[in-house]
Amino acid sequence: MDATPTFLEQLIAAGHLIPMGVDGLYGKSGVFEDILDKLDRLISRHGAAQQAEVMRFPPAISQQNFEESEYLKTFPHFAGTVHCFCGDEREHRRVLDCVAEGKDWTEGQKASGVVLTPAACYPSYPVIARRGPLSEQGVTLDLLSYCFRHEPSLEPTRLQLFRMREYVRMGTPEQVLAFRQHWLEEGEKMMRSLALPLIIDVANDPFFGRAGRVLAASQREQKLKFELLVPVNSEENPTACLSFNYHMDHFGLIWALRTPGDEVAHTACVGFGLERITLALFRHHGFDPKAWPAEVQAVLGGF
Ligand code: ATP
Ligand code: ZN
Ligand code: MG
């Protein structure tokens, strides 16, 4: 009996995702990348009025900044640390022997001082804090990074390495809340222009453990996180394609970000999951962008 292929299987058959032997790790077709680049430029057009400062960081941060961020308190299950061989020739032989015998060779690997970036905005806070107090206008950044989260899945929308475009705002509570409200509206406008069905809802992060449930409830109650969701894998469980986060003074306190009035700065960010929006377009308009509705093609600049 032939089962209907899953969305993941369809994407692989169409050549858009190239399996690499690990769930959540895929190569992408040229067409996939073309769409993703066009989305990146579309986001830039919607963000142009922000006059954001563009910064690009490699997909890793220092172990020190990672520890300071308190990511381990809430998301220990997602973290990806880079470990390396630092041994001598004797230890090298032991590693090769272990590989040959199918034993664990990774035990001797040592922390390299580098941790994979879990969200595109993480490298930016310590960098901006080092400049000194913010100006009256605060800071608005335009960021894009590959991000790592250890959440292997058979859903093509849940990758272990994915690209997150972000705008980040640092300033007074009024400035960052106005920024988030602006992006809630602008993000919806952008996604509607792509003819995607969507809802916006209050959300919570997938915090770890029992303490995490308390954090999640309080995050929802204070409406700190909103998501723009599009049905991609299923109608019942729509996928977060954009998220709108208000961190209050969390990062400001950690990295001593100050306003000109010497208050602790507040921060907010809007994150765009570039692979997820690409997948949403495939789901709703088909696997060939040349056959997409003319207005959607026009918004993206044509195929
Ligand atoms: P989810 O609710 O699906 O677990 P999230 O709330 O953890 O996602 P954020 O931490 O807000 O996501 O990340 C910002 C954006 O990055 C999300 O809106 C989404 O588009 C994208 N994203 C997050 N996790 C993944 C992933 N594993 N694979 C692909 N894109 C992702
Ligand atoms: Zn962010
Ligand atoms: Mg979420």
Image (tube, grey):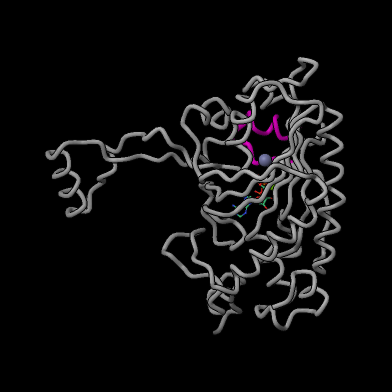
Q: Split into 4 quadrants, where in the image is the N terminus? A: bottom right
Residue nearer the viewer, 120 or 245: 120
The residue positioned farthest toward the top in the image shown: 262
Which corner quadrant holds the C terminus? bottom right
**Figure quadrant, ligand 2:** top right
Task: List x then y, in percent, for residue 201.
Answer: 82, 48
The range drawn in magenta is 204-218
Q: Quick check: 84 above or below 233?
A: above
**Left of 97 or right of it: where is 200?**
right
- Vertical order, 54 against 255 (above or below): below
Q: Tell me which secondary structure the magenta stretch mostly adopts.
A: helix
Number of marks: 0
Which quadrant of the structure image shows residue 176?
top right
> Which quadrant holds residue 118?
top right
Q: Position of residue 105 (x, y in %)?
A: 25, 45
Residue 18 visible (yes or no)? yes
Residue 131, placed above or below residue 34 = above
Q: Nearer the viewer, residue 238 or 224?
A: 224
Viewed as shown, does residue 113 lie left or right of 235? left
**Horizontal arrangement in the rendering, residue 50 relative to residue 5 (left or right):** right
Query: What is the x, y in percent for residue 122?
Result: 60, 36
Relative to 73, is 78 above or below? below
The residue depicted at 57 percent of the width and 32 percent of the height is 71
Q: Name the residue located 51 percent from the left edge and 58 percent from the top edge.
A: 24
Residue at 47% from the left image edge and 42% from the top image edge: 80
Whether residue 233 is visible, yes or no, is no
- Residue 138 included in the magenta stretch of the image: no
Work out whether residue 210 or residue 240 is closer to the camera in this orientation and state it.
240
